[in-house]
Image (spheres, rainbow, N blue to C red):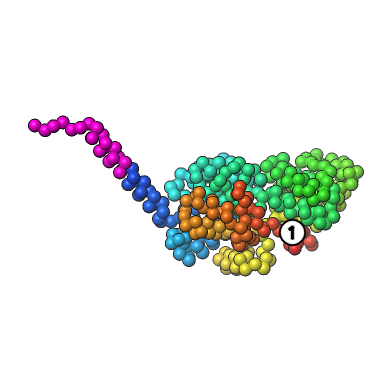
Amino acid sequence: MLKSSNPKKIGSLLAAAILLILLAQWAGWFNKADKGDILIGLAWPVATKNSMLKEGVALAVDEINGRGGINGRKVRLVEKDDEGTVTGGVTAAQSLTRIPNLVAVIGHRASFVSIAASAIYEEAGIVMLSPASTAPGLTQKGYRLVFRNIPSDAEIARQLALFAAAQGHRRTAIYYSEDSYGLGLANAFEDHAKNAGIKIVDRISYYAGREDLERIAKKWSALDYDSIFVAHYMPDGAIFIADAVGAGISVPFLAGDAMDTPQLYEVAGTAAEGTVVGSIFNPGDPRPETKDFIEKFSKKYNTAPTPYAAQGYDAVWLLAAAMEESGSTDPQAIAATLRTFKEKPGAAGSHTFTDNGDEVGDLVVKKIIRSGEFQFID
């Protein structure tokens, strides 16, 4: 007659079997995650406001794969159109974070979209690297996986404030948009202007028309102003410049990167002459990285690259360098390595990341409109 089995022994054996199954599943997932293509997302308003960023990203991916990939693994791009809206951005982010083994996302364009999506990537444990969002708020939430490879509005404002002070400006008025971009840029310029010895005599975000602007111009004249900083988008910023000159204002204008477009002169006409814009990417930069990028991009697409094309190109190479140097595709390892980059050369300039994910490298350039065209200022 057989003896009855020991219940405790059976329970132990079952527990051990379950543990072995779980370990086998985990090992299989780990091996899969460490093999095959490296998945990188692209979240961008490709259909409506691409500005050749997708082409810059694609060029970098082709180059990396053409040389054998990253540590022997090919890079595969997963594209989601965020439509340039918060709803579209959140939807795109949620869709990307559900893709197994996705390690990073390049995006988004608008700061208000990036700020909304950043929490989703942080929660999902995926690196986000924005090549376009400049609002300071993007990197002020304490997130460890959120970066930008473009100067923030604060850095652009700092450079413009220093330039204005060097030009002898001491009393500036500000015209800004009532949103995250306009407020962030205006506030940053005011802070850095004060440090540079410039007094902000007034700030406005609205005027009712030409007559109202004439009244404001008289007020500013009484305050002895000598320049105006425009923290606004196109075409509104250009319309303001045209209206201001029409109202008798003749002081120099300075503006942020949102005004870096030929549309500025098309809308404002001769009123825009002499306007100085803080922006990114100088195609005339003699550095070999810039010249090489322009040559390859122009050959592939039969057109000159935009600043966003250079930013997208650099974003891919920065992520690739972080993976190669860390020897890992783990997002935490990628993020930790990005923070070690100091003056990392790229097509748009040299990249340096702060601990909070901000870009403080040598990327800001200044341009001035002369004879209807932008010219770079040394």
- Asked if residue 205 is positioned above or below residue 32 in the image, the reply reads above
Mark 1 residue crowding within 10 angstroms, few (<14) / some (14–19) / many (20+) = many
Q: Position of residue 224 (x, y in %)?
A: 89, 47
Total count of labels: 1
- Most distant residue in the left direction: 1
- Asked if residue 211 is positioned above or below residue 69 in the image, the reply reads above
Q: Is residue 226 rendered to the left or right of residue 94? A: right
Describe the element under mark 1 as helix, strand or loop: strand
Q: Position of residue 103 (x, y in %)?
A: 48, 50
Magenta residue check for 305: no
| Residue indicated by mark 1 | 367
Q: Position of residue 270 (x, y in %)?
A: 81, 56
Q: Is residue 158 rendered to the left or right of residue 335? A: right
Can residue 113 be seen here? The reply is no
- Asked if residue 164 is positioned above or below residue 13 in the image, the reply reads below
Q: Going 51% across and 59% down the picture, which residue do you hit? A: 325
Magenta segment, which residues? 1-20
Q: Going 57% across and 47% down the picture, which residue do you hit? A: 146
What residue type is disc 1 on? Answer: Lys
